């Protein structure tokens, strides 16, 4: 009996790059960096997913969306594995994903400010004691102020531009 032919891993990655995040549909799951690995184990495609945080309310929807997208491509033997370590970080968001966030009106996380291993800097940032400049995604101004640590979803904070006066979300660094 001839071995079953599988789509290439690269093709599967391409398919997954078309699956939107359910909370921010302009960014894909691969742009977000939560799909960590794709590979074949015999006749089963294994997709490893790291949620943005362990209590993310969108995790179930994301899993269903992945399974649905792959089933639409004819894959009926898919196993999703959840990987919590290492924990997801905003550093995993692709450059294209960051630009998509900005174009959508969400300030992307500032490069290099996520979990960088420097405990006191991270504590200061999470406690609001650091002076990060969050640029307005609409006009580009650095004259912005935090309105609330909590935005439209748990992974975002609410800001306002003091130049154009528009409110916007900032994708918090995790």
Image (tube, rainbow, N blue to C red):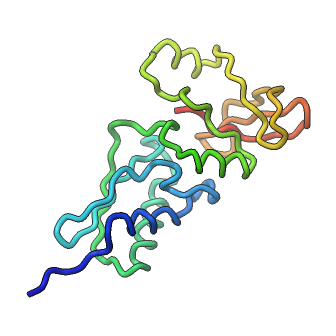
**Percent coordinates x, y for residue 81 in the rendering:** 30, 55
Residue drawn at (33%, 53%), measured in percent from left and top?
37
Specify whether 127 is left or right of 174: right
Please say if 117 is above or below 107.
Answer: above
Specify whether 36 is left or right of 147: left
Q: In the depicted view, which residue is nearer to us: 169 or 117?
A: 117
**Percent coordinates x, y for residue 125 in the rendering:** 59, 20
The quadrant where residue 165 appears: top right
**Which corner quadrant holds the N terminus?**
bottom left
Outermost left residue: 1
Please say if 50 is above or below 28.
Answer: above
The quadrant where residue 162 appears: top right
**Percent coordinates x, y for residue 108 in the rendering:** 65, 40
Residue drawn at (32%, 46%), measured in percent from left and top?
83
**Percent coordinates x, y for residue 9 in the rendering:** 33, 65
Q: In the depicted view, which residue is nearer to us: 151 or 98?
A: 98
């Amino acid at each position: 009996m001839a071995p079953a032919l599988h789509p290439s891993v690269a093709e599967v990655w391409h398919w997954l790059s078309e699956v939107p995040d359910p909370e921010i549909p302009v960014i894909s799951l691969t742009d977000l960096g939560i799909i960590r690995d794709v590979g074949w184990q015999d006749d089963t495609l294994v997709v490893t997913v790291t949620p943005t945080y362990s209590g993310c309310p969108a995790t179930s929807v994301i899993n269903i969306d992945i399974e649905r997208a792959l089933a639409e491509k004819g894959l009926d033997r898919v196993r999703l594995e959840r990987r919590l370590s290492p924990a997801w970080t905003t550093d995993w968001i692709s450059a294209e994903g960051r630009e998509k966030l900005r174009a959508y009106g969400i300030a992307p996380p500032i490069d290099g400010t996520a979990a960088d291993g420097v405990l006191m800097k991270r504590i200061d940032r999470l406690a609001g004691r650091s002076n990060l400049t969050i640029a307005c995604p609409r006009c580009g101004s650095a004259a912005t102020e935090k309105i609330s640590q909590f935005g439209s979803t748990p992974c975002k904070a609410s800001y306002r531009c003091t130049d154009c006066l528009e409110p916007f979300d900032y994708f918090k660094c995790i």
